[in-house]
Amino acid sequence: MSAPVFLADASSSSDGGAAGGLAGFPAGSLYVLDGAEGRHAGVVQRRGVGEAVDVVDGEGLRLRCTIEGVEPSGVHLRVREVVEEPAPDVVVTLVQALAKGDRDEMAIEAATEVGADAVVPWQAERSIVVWRGDRAAKSRARWLATVRAATKQARRARLPRVDLAIDTRGLVERTRQVVDAGGAVVVLHEEAVVPLAEVALPVPASQDAAAAGRAPEVLVVVGPEGGISEREVEALTGAGARTARLGPHVLRTSTAGPVAIAMLVQRLGRWGGADDER
């Protein structure tokens, strides 16, 4: 069974290295997992001496550790190995329309588990839910917590970015920027002719470019319960987006995004077997 993952807190410390950063903890050093994550590991999960755990910084750095002691102040870990996971050479982003109930949160949770690199809350024309004022801040905080928990569940070393909510005008502008930069924007639509499996994907960036944040992006746009309006489809395709269908069945807004993300990361080779033709 894989080791559980904990996200490093800014207050964590050790016998060497800078507090809060994992880069200063080589193999053999002592790392103290404290704060909320330390309490969760030691008190809630009751992890014990000798157990293996991973600590990640959310940016690709992973410490593979063994528990040496559990105290009220935190869990003391001995670093066995340091692993740096590469940045994605194509950034896969889910643009999820706000939906009633918790369907949008279900979507970003599953999308994070299967490999989304970022999620964007979209205030679509037909979204019943509206993020305004205090509600917007509280709702985004829930999205952040959902993505954080899903990252740990999936044992990921990279924490997906949660952008601020945008409306359709903002999404159209984002579409232009992504396409102009060599990326692709795919609007999932039940009436589309081209299947997602045949949509051309961007050429992956070199690892140096990816590490510098210059990887091309694929935006996957999912509408709300009532679907994407014709006016929105026209505006997005006019900005360079393409429409695509997932398959013969119409999926809920909570499942369409995760299924699409899973298909894309498979094609990009993250689950083994990249497309030869993009």
Image (cartoon, helix red, strand yellow):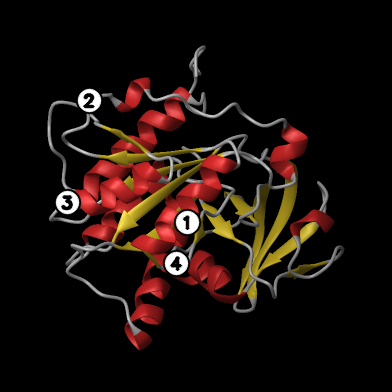
Q: Which residue is mark 3?
A: 227
Residue 112 place in picture, x, y as percent? 42, 49
What is the secondary structure assignment of the residue under circle 2?
loop
Residue 144: mark in rendering: 4
Decide if residue 222 is in sight here.
no
Q: Which residue is nearer to you in this view: 178 or 208? A: 178
Q: Position of residue 194 (x, y in %)?
A: 28, 24
Left or right, 275 with reference to 98? right
Give the residue at x 39% y 62%: 169
Between discs 2 and 3, the one toward the N terminus: 2
Circle 4/circle 3 CB separation < 8 Å: no
**In the image, which disc is placed on residue 193?**
2
CA gap between label 1 and label 4 equals 24 Å
Q: Position of residue 36 (x, y in %)?
A: 54, 74
Measured in 3D between alpha carbons, the distance from the residue under mark 2 to the one under mark 4, in whole angstroms, is 35 Å
Q: Which residue is at 64% across, 63% downward?
A: 8
Q: Check disc 1 and report its element: helix, strand or loop.
A: helix
The disc, 1 or 4, on the residue closer to the chain's N-terminal end is 4
What residue is rendered at 73% in x and 33% in y?
Answer: 207
